[in-house]
């Protein structure tokens, strides 16, 4: 069993917990997720299985889309409603127009400082572990791209919004920054990921509905966004052996190499008219990874 299972993650469970449950249900040896969701968050969580785990670097880089809810006038230690309240303020003067403008200010290329309560590492330890001990460390700002940050509805002090963003964007931090710009603070009260790269809620299956016979997105389809080169029998054999192949793709282009039956043989990068292999895939040649 090889490919990607798109799970509609429920609230109240970690992404690692979803992986453990899927691994037990499928009886697979190699299983991993391709983009963490906080325990309170729900929605699209791609789970890589078997040879599909080799796809993680190409799926983690995908952009994401979310629908969420924020509460103005509230600030917490975790930047969401699961944290301890550190401040309350009157947000009654905030208008829809002011909130919309504060969101619009974040659209485009920006820099964001990751929150302390995150899975990033500092000195070999997760930031959230340090945060639990009351330790705060400097975090370097990271470039992000916010393609969309729109207000859907406003029922003070709560508002619903949609955001489309690059990988590594913390929606909790966006909400905090909007609240600070409005002078009252803000906290994330709900979050649902509606898209991760090419995967949407329409592709997702509820965690409780996952069975051993679950249908996975094939490795080839999971990276359909990459450039494609179709191999003949000789090319397939060369790719399986890691032998160089010519290409007309521009330098730096990532290419998925497909066999005559549409199976993903490798992912390679074009350099000086040749394909340099990143990953080779052996499913179809070996026993299923159960």
Image (cartoon, grey):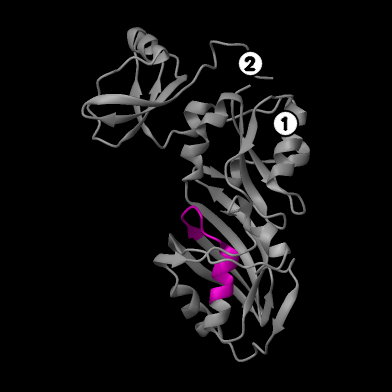
Q: Position of residue 167 (x, y in %)?
A: 49, 52
Look at the picture and state if 263 lies above or below 129. Answer: above
Q: Is residue 16 left or right of residue 63?
A: right
Residue 167 magenta-highlighted:
yes
Q: Secondary structure at mark 2?
A: loop
Q: Nearer the viewer, residue 209 or 178?
A: 178
Query: Would you name the residue on which mark 2 appears?
Result: 288
Quadrant of the drawing holding the N terminus: top right
Q: Position of residue 286 (x, y in %)?
A: 58, 11
- Would you call the spot at circle 2 few (<14 residues within 10 Å), some (14-19), or many (20 or more)? few
Q: Position of residue 88 (x, y in %)?
A: 71, 84
Contact between labelled residues 1 and 2, with CB atoms less than 8 Å apart: no
- Looking at the image, tell me whether mark 2 or mark 1 is earlier in sequence order: 1
- Residue drawn at (51%, 27%), measured in percent from left and top? 219
Look at the picture and state if 258 lies above or below 38. Answer: above
Q: Position of residue 200 (x, y in %)?
A: 56, 45
Quadrant of the drawing holding the C terminus: top right
Q: Is residue 211 visible?
A: no
- Would you call the spot at circle 1 few (<14 residues within 10 Å), some (14-19), or many (20 or more)? some
Q: Nearer the viewer, residue 267 or 259?
A: 267
Query: Would you name the residue on which mark 1 appears?
Result: 23
Q: Is residue 60 left or right of residue 216?
A: left
- Residue drawn at (54%, 75%), measured in percent from left and top? 177
Q: Which residues are magenta?
A: 164-177
Q: Secondary structure at mark 1?
A: helix
Look at the picture and state if 234 lies above or below 204. Answer: above
Q: CA distance from mark 2 to mark 1?
A: 14 Å
- Residue drawn at (62%, 81%), measured in percent from left and top? 185
- Residue drawn at (68%, 24%), measured in percent from left and top? 29
């Amino acid at each position: 069993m090889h490919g990607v299972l798109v799970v509609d993650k429920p609230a109240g469970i970690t992404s690692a917990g979803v992986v453990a449950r899927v691994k037990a249900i499928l009886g697979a040896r190699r299983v991993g997720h391709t983009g963490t969701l906080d325990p309170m968050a729900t929605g699209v969580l791609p789970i890589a299985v078997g040879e599909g785990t080799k796809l993680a670097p190409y799926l983690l880089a995908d952009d994401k889309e979310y629908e969420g809810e924020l509460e103005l006038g509230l600030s917490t230690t975790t930047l969401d409603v699961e944290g301890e309240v550190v401040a309350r303020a009157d947000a009654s003067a905030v208008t829809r127009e002011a909130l919309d403008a504060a969101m619009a200010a974040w659209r485009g290329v920006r820099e964001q400082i990751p929150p302390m309560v995150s899975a990033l590492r500092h000195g070999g330890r997760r930031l959230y572990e340090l945060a639990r001990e009351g330790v705060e460390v400097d975090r370097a700002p990271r470039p992000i791209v916010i393609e969309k940050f729109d207000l859907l509805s406003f029922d003070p002090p709560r508002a619903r919004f949609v955001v489309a963003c690059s990988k590594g964007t913390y929606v909790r931090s966006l909400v905090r920054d909007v609240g600070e710009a409005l002078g009252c603070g803000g906290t994330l009260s709900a979050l649902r990921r509606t898209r991760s790269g090419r995967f949407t809620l329409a592709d997702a299956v509820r965690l409780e509905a996952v069975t051993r016979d679950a249908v996975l997105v094939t490795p080839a389809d999971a990276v359909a966004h990459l450039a494609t080169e179709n191999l003949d029998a000789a090319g397939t054999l060369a790719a399986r052996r890691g032998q160089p192949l010519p290409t007309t793709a521009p330098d730096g282009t990532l290419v998925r190499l497909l066999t005559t039956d549409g199976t993903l043989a490798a992912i390679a990068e074009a350099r000086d008219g040749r394909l340099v292999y990143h990953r080779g895939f052996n499913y179809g040649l070996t026993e299923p990874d159960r």
